[in-house]
Amino acid sequence: MLQARVLPACCAYELMKLGHEVTVLEASGRHGGHVFTIRDGLSDGLYADGGAELFTKPGYERYWEYTREFNLPVLPYPCRHDMLRHVNDKFFTDDQLRDPQILKSFGLNDKEVKHMSQPGHTWWDLKYLYMQPYLDKFKDEYQPFGIGYDHLDTTPIAEIYKKEGASPAALRHLGGEKSSALQELWGAAILKKRGIKAIPTDVYRLKGGNQGLPDAFAKRLGARIKLNCPIRSIRNEKDHVAVTYRQFGEDKEIKADFLANCIPLPVFRKIPVTPAFSPEKQYVIDNVQYDTYAHFIFQASSKFWIDDGFKTINMQFGHPDIYEIWQMAEEVDTHRVVLLATGPGGVSPERALAGFRAAYPGKKDTIEQALVKDWTRDPFAPNCERLRHYPMGELKKFWPLIMEPAGRIHFAGSYADNLNWGQEAATRSANRVAKEIDMA
Amino acid sequence: MAQLKRRQFLKNTIVSGLGASLMAPELQAKESLDQQSVEPETRYAPQSGKSKRVIVAGAGIAGLLCV
């Protein structure tokens, strides 16, 4: 009955409604972690998602259920439409990147040109041309082993591309000399099973900012969330867990039946846990790698790119200080616009703006304000998503151990699922952990 | 419109009141929940039959969801 009732409803959030007694300990002074909507410093009611940016459909099924449950308005997010991409030191539109003549000029072979020039295909779909024959052997998206591909964890995916006839130009574009073929194929198979493109172009965001979802949860959790309460140590006993945390300058201890760790592993690994985890689990905790970057927020007084003849400001740059840029909060009723960009940590907003002005292919801009949310400098959430793949040949060291409980400690978060997509992995793994604890 | 006699009115209200008090507690709860805008804290019984104490470390989206 529980399964029938809860699935496909949101199992994790149901735990509180099921009557379990919960306490959330958060080290920082706000909830939401990497889901963070910025308003300070922006004019006219503009806002920008400084962390988690978007979600897809299909995909993010549980996330969508929450948006319906809490009546959160969802907006299409055209940040990947009509994009200008920087390839071989030139800008190309998506239409141009489907033009057979242009594709041939890159050195792609006939098979690749035919594949890439099909309507709806994007620049990112090329790898599927060569991965496709391998994907249907994955029957269970949580089980990459035992289907005849185990040996491919030590084979670079580039070898698969070569074997399947990729041109030298495609190999340069696809890379993959240091990526495990098994892990690349598994990731592609997961997306295929969920009906999602490699890089989905039709994506969505919450009106008013993606922080609307954690805000909705926090509202319902109320005083169960304790902010500014960093965990100092954990005792993982046979019949309970005991957590020591700091609050108002004092160490306090609480005991519980279970601990759900939703702290990113690079932060969690600094917390003393007794007794020690098994060497295998400790290896996972110590060696999972994440990416991290900065979000730059530019406010402009007009859609200056229109005057320069561009449909959108959705652009990818080959610049070291700024990777890509797009518009958000389009629905806010103002002549001003807010632009989001990504770039490396440690870059000031002024330097990112200078990078934009060097890379932007138009004549002038009307940017009047530059801000940054540099996650690499964030003391509480310095990591973004887990790296897509584990080191080549090491999948068995990490999977499925990364999502398995250790004693009374369970593991959820963007790192603890089969795909590293932040909010998707977070919601899926949180559902799993809630179910594990409820059924324990 | 026919006038409702005092005796009949009392009878009706007693029966409906009795009916309401005999209604299963979970149905009563559901009715009251349906009138609430914020989700209830407790709607069903735990699967294991025992409420558990759970500490969630981190109030990111996974942490909030976990509860």
Image (spheres, coloured by chain):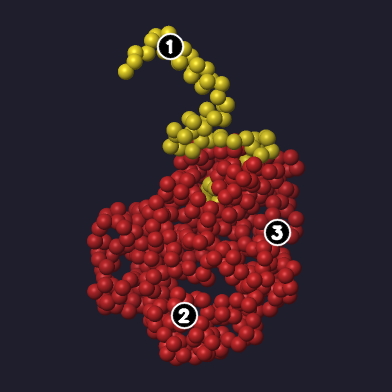
**Identity, as a three-letter code, of the amino acid under mark 3:** Leu
> How many C-alpha atoms fall within 10 Å of the one at disc 1: few (<14), some, or many (≥20)?
few
Residue under pointer 2? A118
For the residues bearing labels 2 and 1, Cβ distance under 8 angstroms = no
Q: CA distance from mark 2 to mark 1?
A: 77 Å
**Chain under callout 1:** B
Work out which quarter of the rendered image holds the N terminus of chain A and state it: top right
**Chain under callout 3:** A
Q: CA distance from mark 3 to mark 2?
A: 41 Å
Give residue A288's quadrant in the image.
bottom right
Chain A drawing hue: red
Q: Residue at x 55, y 24 (%)?
A: B23
Q: Residue at x 63, y 72 (%)?
A: A135
Q: Residue at x 73, y 53 (%)?
A: A277
Q: Is residue A179 visible?
A: yes
Instruction: Identify the mark at residue A401; answer none if there is no mark.
Output: 3
Residue A75 position within the rendered picture, expressed as x and y whole percent measured from the top left: 39, 57
**Identity, as a three-letter code, of the amino acid under mark 2:** Gln
Chain B drawing hue: yellow
Q: Nearer the viewer, mark 2 or mark 1?
A: 1
Do discs 3 and 2 belong to a common subunit?
yes
> How many C-alpha atoms fall within 10 Å of the one at disc 2: few (<14), some, or many (≥20)?
few
Q: Is residue A347 visible?
A: no
Residue under pointer 1? B8
Q: Secondary structure at mark 2?
A: loop
Report the front residue among B21 and A36. B21
Q: CA distance from mark 3 to mark 1?
A: 70 Å
Say how many tags the image has: 3
Q: Residue at x 74, y 40 (%)?
A: A239
Report the front residue among B51 and A351. B51
Q: Is residue A99 above or below residue B42?
A: below
